Image (cartoon, rainbow, N blue to C red):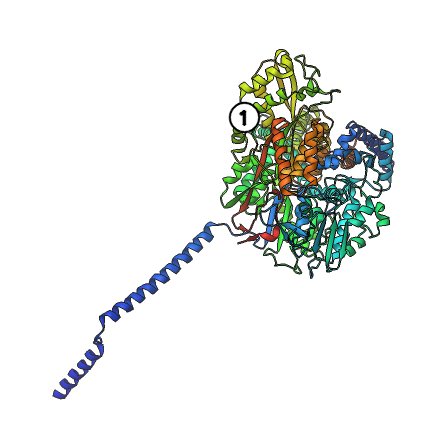
Amino acid sequence: MKRLSFLLVFLCSFILFACAEKPSDTSQEIADLNEKIANLTQENEELKKKIDELTQQLAKPEIKNPDTFILANYGNLRTLDPCVAYDVTSSQRLWNIYEPLIFFDGSHTDKYKPLVAMEVPTLENGGISEDGRTYKFTIRKGIKFHEGQSLTPEDVVYTFKRNMIADPDGGPMWMLLEALTGEGSTRDKEGKIIPGIYEKIDKCVEAKGDQVIFHLPKPYPPFMGILAYSSSVILSKQWCIANGCWDGNIKNASKFNNPAPGHEPLLKIANGTNAYKMKSWEPNKEFVFERFDGYWGPQPKLKRAIVKYVKEWSTRKLMLQNGDADRVRVDNPYVPEVKAIKGLKFYEVPLLSVSAAFFCQKVNPTGNPNIGSGKLDGKGIPPDFFSDINVRKAFLHAFDRKTYAQDVFNNLVIMPTSPNVKGLPYHKDVPVYEFDVNKARDYMQKAWGGQAWEKGFKMIITHNTGNEMREAAAHMMAENIMSLNPKFQIEVRNVEWKDYLVQYRNFMFPIFIIGWGADYPDPHNFMYTFMHSRGVYGRYMAYQNDEVDKLCEAGIANVDPKEREKVYHRLQDLWYAEAIGNTIYQQIVVRAYRDWVHGFVPNAMLTDANEMLMDIHKQ
Amino acid sequence: MLPFIIRRFFFLIFVLFGVSVLIFGILMTFSPERRAAAYVTTPQQAKDIPKIIKQFGLDDPFYHQYFRWIKEVAKGNLGWSLVAARPVGEAFWRYFPVTLEMNLFAAPIVIFFGIWLGSVSGIHRDTWVDHSTRIFAIIGWSLPTFLFALILLMVFYGYFQAFSPGVLSDELTLFIIDNPDKFTPYTGMYTIDGILNGRLDIALDGLHHLVLPIITYVIVVVALNMRVMRSGIIEELSKDYVLTARAKGADNKTVNFKHARRNALLPVVTVAGQLVALSMEGSVSVEVVYNRHGIGWWLAESATQLDMPVLMCICLFMGVVFVITNLILDIMYAVIDPRIRLN
């Protein structure tokens, strides 16, 4: 029994000893506990993050087509031939398939990045000669076309010559022809070939070693901007000739001049060097781009891109809302509607474009209802009604710029003071004719020796059908002028766009409201157009001012930035002093993307029809 | 019957000549500048309008231009479509299947649903059935197609995220683009080509994209057919032979469907025929809203842009469609009513 008791005591002692905690160090214990707590906190944080991610994924719709970008647009693509394409839709396709020598660098419109060229020529690096008449480009090596050909300087030379030789009516080649030959076309007004034009084309560009050299007849400051345009993208000589383009022999040039619409050889085929190639094109349905694996530069992240033609806004909006489109084209009136959609992000991009109301100083009186009786008898206006500066100033004072910007654009607009809009070189804000009905009244009372006020007048202001911004401007001018005197009667009418183009060119409108988008980012493209007596709009205003004409010509003939600045500043001042027209808006477009799209780089030269696919990705 | 058909086809030549002269004449009322403007879109391009007039001889006399066009048509060249960026002939065969596909499904529904609805309404005249169908018809007929199409799209695609616009889903479109050897577009109609290629998923997807366009089209168009049928039934039911049939002990089913409905069908056949013929030029609203680019969309775009070769082509096509439709209708009259003899 004793033994048993002893054994039990021993066992219990053993068990108790075994179970007893070791004498512990308190600080060590606390440290261990803290470590445990820290670990648990970290785990907790990680779990929270995971829960958040999962919740977000549940809340957000799934990224549809993660490797494909879908743009719903309504621009009609007419051709893929760079010498014919002269609209924003075609440029979008060409800029993504082909590459020019240089292109706009990021958001800059005055700085360029080299693409096919190794570097951007400047005066400093000797790429541009001191006299501004020679441009040298070293051509990048190792560039492959989509169909496998290697790009050589000879391809570059051929491209420029081929495009200028083709020079179709209504095409963009006037820009290069003007810069490189001094002529705006290969044909005269009668459609006959200008003698010696092909020889000029043949000599204006040459290849020497790995360089391509352009010889300009005189300095042409916007030349670099023209080289970035979609008509300057580089083609493969071998491929072009195989597909029926100019054969490379200058003696045969006239056979390839001015192809009829639909007969341009590169109309529906493409073979560029850019990061995307054309996969398929169903006219007015969709255009499919596919990543080009042999691209010389960094590979883009998206495998494909589809541009869909969707004309109806409601359909486009629903596609964006449902994530079936990554971006849709949004016209200004629909901006508030699209901003209410969740899961989108927006970019506001001012464009190098301007719309203006032009006063025609010599209206065509033959069968023209827009000027009523054609006399200042209260039932019409004389054809030269707007030749009186008092009338022009009265109309300018009758335009309420602040209300217009607020009501029509929700202030999402730039109200330009002259055609040299913000973003263009040598822009300056000149004074404007502020809204003041009293001043408008004073000027109308002075107009036509007081007869306009005494007899009154009747006229029609027109705008192109469907353009609500221009319609609002026409109504504002009409109503404010009519409020001055009950004898003033102005009717506002809409005219279908193509009719509008024809009629303003026939001097049918006393006031025509029309816009201009930059061909290249230089004031010459705007000031000559708007103010020169032979400019696209200056001519149809029948506006003639020798000083203005000389300044416009001096602006393009001069390479010295300081001299050009003086010229264009003076022209902008004259726009105000002469009350030539009313620049009513410089558009800011709103681009609406699904929030999973990243990388868009705004550029004022690229309209909302454009999308540089290389830049963007979905995440 | 054969001489009758041959004679009708012979007349087709004169019909087409008349239509072409008429349409060409109407288009010539536009100035050469206006017709040249079809080739330009921007003010930048507008400076070349005089050159375009010279290039295409748009200021030549009417008969010069007309015979130049006829000469090209005789060679099989219908001209160039600026809107489609393709030769007119090629563009036609791209757009026509889209319109035809919808009509293949919608036309039988319009005809048979209209006949059934009209019969039910006429037989149950002045009952709640009649009133309901008439209200349905009035609403359907009065609904602006564009608005109705938009409402359906907003509800079914916008809210329920079903029935997306277009003709085929992106996934399958890309499959077809990537695998031209695995899918042959025999007819240009995905529902039929899907079956012919053994790809039921493509056929069903095509059909899925047709649901809203068909509903829109049927609800808007069926009303006319239904009302004609209803009037016909009411008229026939009041005739003596119906009374005789009833006196002889014929039951309602026999009287209504065997006697009255057959006689009431003649005007319905005429209306249905014209509706089907008209539908061949597409429904602009349906095609625009549902993003189906068929003949209707093409015609509307071409009319606004004065794409002359397209307008001429579609007018001639419609001339052919109407001549053939009338021929079929005449044959059907003889089948439905044995008293009518084709000669």
Left or right: A589 in relation to B69: left
Instruction: Using the image as rendered, state which of residue A432 and residue A65 is in the foreground.
Output: A432
Residue B295 is drawn in which quadrant? top right
Q: In this rendering, is residue A306 above or below B23?
A: below
> Quick one: B237 or A543, which is closer to the camera?
A543
Question: Quadrant location of the N terminus of chain B?
Answer: top right
Chain holding disc 1: A
Q: Is residue A274 visible?
A: yes
Direction from residue A205 to residue A605 in the image, left or right: left
Residue farthest along the bottom direction in this orientation: A3
Return the x and y of residue A162 as percentages of the image width and height.
Answer: 78, 49
Outermost residue toward the left?
A2
Q: Quadrant of the C terminus of chain B?
A: top right
Q: Answer left or right for B141 relative to A157.
A: left
Count of labels in the image: 1
Badge 1 element: loop
**Residue B48 drawn at (x, y percent):** 76, 36
Q: Nearer the viewer, residue B304 or A330?
A: A330
Is residue B327 at all visible to an observer of this figure?
no
Kindly indicate the quadrant of the structure image that contains residue B311: top right
Location of residue A572 with respect to A387 vertically, above or below: below
In this rendering, is residue A424 above or below A394? Answer: below
Picture coordinates of residue A219, whole percent (x, y): 71, 44
Q: Which residue is mark 1?
A: A434
Quadrant of residue A85 within the rendered picture: top right
Residue A287 is left or right of residue A414, and the answer is: right
The amino acid type of the residue labelled 1 equals: Glu
In the rendering, at what x and y percent does residue A65 appear?
Answer: 57, 53
B224 up-or-down from A120: above or below: above
Circle 1 Cα neighbour tier, 10 Å, few/some/many (<14 / 14–19 / ≥20):
some
